[in-house]
Image: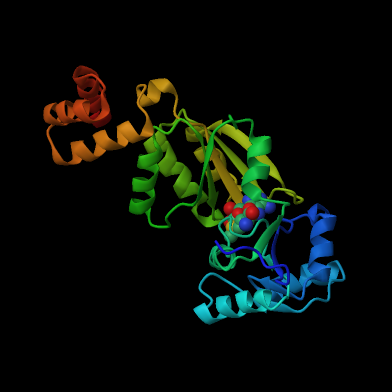
Amino acid sequence: MTAVASHQGILYVVATPIGNLGDMVPRAVETLQTVAVIAAEDTRHSSRLLSHFGIKTPCIAYHDHSDELRVEQLVGRMQAGDSIALISDAGTPLVSDPGYRLVRSARQAGIQVVPVPGACAMIAALSAAGLPSDRFAFEGFLPAKQVARCVHLQALATDPRTLIFYEAPHRILETLQDMTQIFGAEREVVIARELTKTFETIKNDKVGDLVNWVAGDSNQQRGEIVLLVHGASKQENGMMTPEQAHIMKVLLEELPVKQAASIGSRLTGLKKNFLYDWALQQSE
Ligand code: SAM
């Protein structure tokens, strides 16, 4: 990394509210007022937020598929001394939102990157869900197609960490049904919907029961949603780590159970008999 030259501008990564404008932090307003330009995911969308706070700084569009030239232009401006604030439509940039390419390029060019933290839907959901929060995995959006979604969920089935997903309202029911199939109907899931807004709803239940609740109330299939899943219990993952379970799943795709257990035992250090029983349980 190049050393930061003092005449260079700064890239501020600024979080904005996820619904409730009262969550805009004063430092975010001050930063957006004082930078030379705001790089926004959608300038029209952000104009409402900016005018609410009386921010008149010029805005330009930035998303991760902006061409290379746009990234170079922004980095060039910062090298020439202008500071830039990056915002997305809502919440924290780069969290299932644009910004990665710009932040990466700025840091590679030796430009100082400063976070201005604030709202983030997955952290807000985790803070109120009542699920273990000592270890968690943010998975972003699941694939839209069912087969790909199930493959993805299957790979997470024995993960002991709390799993966090963003989900579109029109897919919530299908995703809960797939989770019931793959994680089992008893697994605890939390739906955190419309956080910080008028119809904020946080509901936890067994995923099998949540399917019925969501199917029976179309309001639960509206708005913005975070899904949180309790991690697999030791019983569910048979004391195996996700990596060990993954190795066994790959072996079982190619080999008979006995041979998979034997090779799996050499690769994981777990007992052959244990892996044999585990493999039989998976196919039940
Ligand atoms: N960068 C944002 C953040 O920090 O949370 C996330 C952007 S992502 C494109 C949008 C998704 O975040 C929504 O589809 C929904 O899953 C989740 N989300 C955003 N706002 C939310 C809210 N108020 N309540 C629940 N989920 C929300």
> Residue 222: x percent and y percent?
61, 54
Quarter of the rendered image showing ligand 1: bottom right
The answer to whether residue 213 is visible is yes
Judging from the image, the colouring scheme is: rainbow
Marks counted in the figure total 0
Identified at 83% across, 54% down, the residue is 22
> Residue 146: x percent and y percent?
37, 53
Identified at 65% across, 73% down, the residue is 42
Is 178 placed left or right of 164 in the picture?
Answer: left
Identified at 13% across, 37% down, the residue is 255
The answer to whether residue 222 is visible is no
Is 216 placed left or right of 5 in the picture?
Answer: left
Is 238 placed left or right of 185 in the picture?
Answer: left
Q: Is residue 253 above or below residue 38?
A: above
Q: Is residue 234 above or below residue 210?
A: above
Q: Is residue 146 above or below residue 202?
A: below
**245, 227: nearer the viewer:** 245
Q: Quadrant of the C terminus?
A: top left
> Residue 73: x percent and y percent?
60, 80
Location of residue 58 by image quarter: bottom right
Identified at 12% across, 26% down, the residue is 258
Is 262 placed left or right of 43 in the picture?
Answer: left
**79, 48: nearer the viewer:** 79
**57, 281: nearer the viewer:** 57
Residue at the outermost right position: 54
Q: Quadrant of the N terminus?
A: bottom right
> Residue 81: x percent and y percent?
72, 75
